């Protein structure tokens, strides 16, 4: 089966040109239905978003990050720096529960190490931790 890239009509493999558009036909590819994704959360710290994604994937929940490559340096604009964490709708409830259980974890902005919420200084590099 072949398809016209201009009018999207399907034709047998015997044709090479679309009779309507006179355009060369391309092999027809069946499109799979897109997965039903939802946003789990939005964070302003890219390193924290990567840690959250790694944590959830380690728990067997596939995730994707959005907007991780945009940097408005030297003056970041808060809304433009947001990183969204996406997952499948059927995994969202469990993912949110796991993230709530882990909310007492923060990330050192200097060495990107995971530290306890009550730490004021990073035990890994000695950097003073920012309050979230």
Image (spheres, helix red, strand yellow):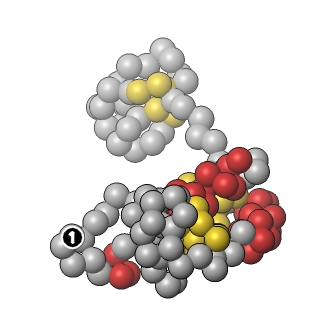
Q: How many marks?
A: 1
Task: Name the residue rendered at 69%, 75% in the picture.
Answer: 104
20 or 102: which is nearer to us?
Answer: 102
Query: Relative to 52, does residue 17 appear above or below in the rendering?
Result: above
Seen in the image, is 115 located left or right of residue 23? right
Q: Which image quarter: residue 74?
A: bottom left
Seen in the image, is 65 located left or right of residue 57? left
Residue 97 is situated, as x and y percent measured from the top left of the image, at 79, 70
Q: Which image quarter: residue 56?
A: bottom right
Task: Name the residue rendered at 74%, 74% in the picture.
Answer: 100
Q: Report whether residue 107 is seen.
A: yes
> Outermost residue, top direction?
14
35 or 2: which is nearer to us?
Answer: 35
Q: Residues within 10 Å of mark 1 (few under 14, many from 20)?
A: few
Q: Report whether residue 11 is seen.
A: no
Task: Name the residue rendered at 67%, 55% in the picture.
Answer: 55
Seen in the image, is 6 located left or right of residue 40? left
> Outermost residue, bottom direction?
131
Residue 73 is situated, as x and y percent measured from the top left of the image, at 21, 70
Kindly identify which residue carries mark 1: 73
Question: Which secondary structure lies at badge 1?
Answer: loop
Task: Name the residue rendered at 59%, 40% in the picture.
Answer: 31
Residue 130 is situated, as x and y percent measured from the top left of the image, at 45, 80
Please state, as top left, top right, bottom left or bottom right, where the N terminus lies in the image. top right
28 or 128: which is nearer to us?
Answer: 128
Q: Which image quarter: residue 103?
A: bottom right
């Amino acid at each position: 089966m072949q398809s016209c890239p201009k009018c999207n009509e399907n034709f047998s493999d015997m044709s090479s040109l679309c009779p309507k558009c006179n355009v060369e036909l391309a092999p027809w590819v069946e499109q799979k239905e897109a997965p039903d994704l939802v946003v789990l959360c939005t964070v302003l710290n890219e390193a924290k978003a990567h840690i959250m994604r790694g944590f959830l994937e380690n728990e067997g929940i596939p995730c994707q990050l959005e907007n991780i490559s945009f940097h408005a340096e030297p003056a970041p604009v808060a809304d433009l720096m947001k990183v969204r964490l996406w997952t499948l709708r059927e995994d969202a409830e469990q993912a949110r529960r796991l993230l709530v259980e882990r909310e007492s974890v923060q990330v050192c902005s200097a060495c990107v190490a995971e530290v306890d919420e009550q730490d004021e200084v990073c035990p890994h590099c000695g950097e003073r931790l920012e309050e979230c």
